[in-house]
Image (tube, rainbow, N blue to C red):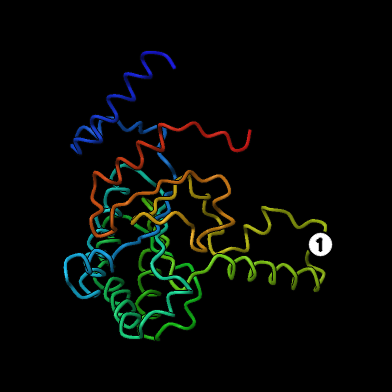
Amino acid sequence: MNSDLLNANDELKAVCAEGDTEKLRSLIDAERLPAHIAFIMDGNRRWAKKRFLPAVMGHKAGVKAFRTVMETCRNIGVKYLTAYAFSAENWQRAPAEVNLLMQLFEYYAKAERQEMCDTGIRLRVIGDMSVLAESVQRELRLSEEATACNSDMTLNLAINYGSRDEIVRAVRSLAKKAASGSVEPQSIDEEMLSGELYTAGIPDPDLLVRTSGELRLSNFLLWQMAYTEFYFSDVLWPDVDEAFVLKAILEFQRRQRRYGG
């Protein structure tokens, strides 16, 4: 490693430790931004427990952190953001907590609709919405429709999402097409299967960020993240701020991506 690169790495470490957002932004290479960042937002309940607060306060704090993440990504030019908001496995949580999360989704869809319209953010919900309460479905769909023409950034909100289920659905769809004769089985390839996923038409994530110290994917975008760079942090989700996002992007830009080559 040459001395210039060593000095650059030392500077990066120093600025990251300092946490100065202005300096962090100045180090970001606008030509090498990740086009698509995926977030596993983990740690709301632990954040609340550490403060002897009910879980509801952790989830509400998590919504504020998410707003900061969304604004930061949009402002620096990230085009796609996918947030794991509620997994298919999360139904196993206490009914009161599940009901609270559904209320937050409904509230968020209403409260942020005009802001997303004004700032050019397009909302897309990925996952099986059919089992959600009608009021939650309605507000999410209204926000999808209201923001459909926005192009500054696309926000994919994963609700009742499970990657294995997504892949099974895609395979079933292709199987039906093959059975009807509209698709030749031997013509099915990766691109065709990708076109049947919830994320069809969206580039695969360049960067995955997971908070709270967990080191797993938890059934999230398994197909799409074949060559994604991972960034794991012990920071709890409600403590995520602009500096945290900038540090994750700087770490991404420090790496050399080879895609198996």
| Residue closest to the eye, 32 or 146 | 32
Amino acid on which the number 1 mark rests in the picture: Pro
Tell me residue 167's x, y (percent). Answer: 62, 65
Give the quadrant of the N terminus: top left
Residue drawn where x is 20% and y is 71% of the image: 57
Residue drawn where x is 32% and y is 83% of the image: 99
130 to the left or right of 142: right
Query: Residue 176 occupies which quadrant of the picture?
Result: bottom right
Residue drawn where x is 38% and y is 67% of the image: 85
| Residue closest to the eye, 258 or 202 | 258
246 to the left or right of 224: left
| Residue closest to the eye, 60 or 185 | 60
- Judging by the rendered image, the residue that carries numbered circle 1 is 185
Query: Residue 102 occupies which quadrant of the picture?
Result: bottom left
Name, please, the residue furthest toward the top. Answer: 3
Tell me residue 195's x, y (percent). Answer: 62, 59
40 to the left or right of 227: left
Tell me residue 41's x, y (percent). Answer: 35, 60
| Residue closest to the eye, 71 or 92 | 92
Does 196 sit above or below residue 26?
Answer: below
User: Secondary structure under badge 1?
Assistant: helix
Give the quadrant of the C terminus: top right
72 to the left or right of 18: right
Give the mark count: 1
Residue drawn where x is 27% and y is 65% of the image: 46
Tell me residue 33's x, y (percent). Answer: 40, 38
- Mark 1 crowdedness (10 Å alpha carbons): few <14, some 14-19, many ≥20: few
Query: Residue 94 occupies which quadrant of the picture?
Result: bottom left
